[in-house]
């Protein structure tokens, strides 16, 4: 399950500790689906407004850019440094699921 949210709600959520965020999101899901939602076995929560490596940013294609630029971003440096993230996904750049998908694709390559 992948959740993402924005606006004032995201600012509210970032003020909460991780356990409180999870509890609130589970409550929302239970209200949406009218059934109990099991506690997740694993979570990863980002904080865009306070993370010094993102600070609410995401990639965009500027005038004159092409898919070749995205392909170039995916290129590893030697066999040592690899890149993943929404900016490197050829179809879903600028999207959360592009970041997730590119990381999953790269992890499969690295595990071979």
Image (cartoon, rainbow, N blue to C red):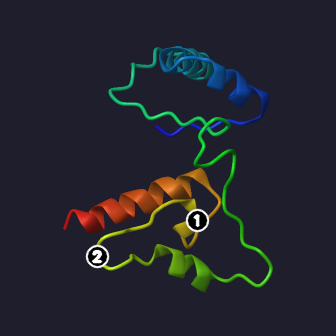
How many residues crowd mark 1 within 10 Å: few (<14), some (14–19), many (20+)? many
Give the camera-side residue of 24 and 79: 79
Q: Is residue 112 above or below residue 51?
A: below
Give the camera-side residue of 103 and 28: 103
Q: Quadrant of the C terminus?
A: bottom left
Left-right relation of 77 to 85: left
Q: CA distance from mark 2 to mark 1?
A: 20 Å
Tell me the residue at 69%/30% (across/down). 10
Residue that label 2 marks? 79
Residue that label 1 marks? 87
Of pointers 2 and 1, the one earlier in the residue sequence: 2
State the image quarter where residue 46 is shown: top right
Tell me the residue at 35%/30% (across/down). 42
Name the spot of residue 89 as percent of width and height, x first. 53, 68
In terms of secondary structure, where does tag 2 sit?
loop
Left-right relation of 41 to 43: left
Name the spot of residue 64 as percent of width and height, x first. 77, 85
Name the spot of residue 78 as percent of width and height, x first. 32, 80
How many residues crowd mark 2 within 10 Å: few (<14), some (14–19), many (20+)? few
């Amino acid at each position: 399950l992948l959740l993402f949210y924005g606006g004032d709600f995201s600012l509210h959520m970032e003020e909460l500790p991780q356990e409180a965020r999870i509890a609130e999101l589970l409550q929302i899901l239970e209200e949406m689906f009218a059934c109990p939602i099991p506690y997740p076995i694993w979570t990863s929560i980002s904080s865009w407004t306070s993370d010094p490596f993102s600070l609410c940013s995401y990639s965009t294609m500027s005038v004159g850019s092409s898919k070749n630029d995205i392909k170039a971003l995916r290129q590893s440096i030697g066999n040592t440094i690899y890149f993943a993230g929404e900016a490197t996904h050829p179809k879903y750049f600028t999207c959360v699921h592009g970041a997730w998908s590119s990381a999953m694709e790269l992890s499969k390559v690295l595990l071979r």
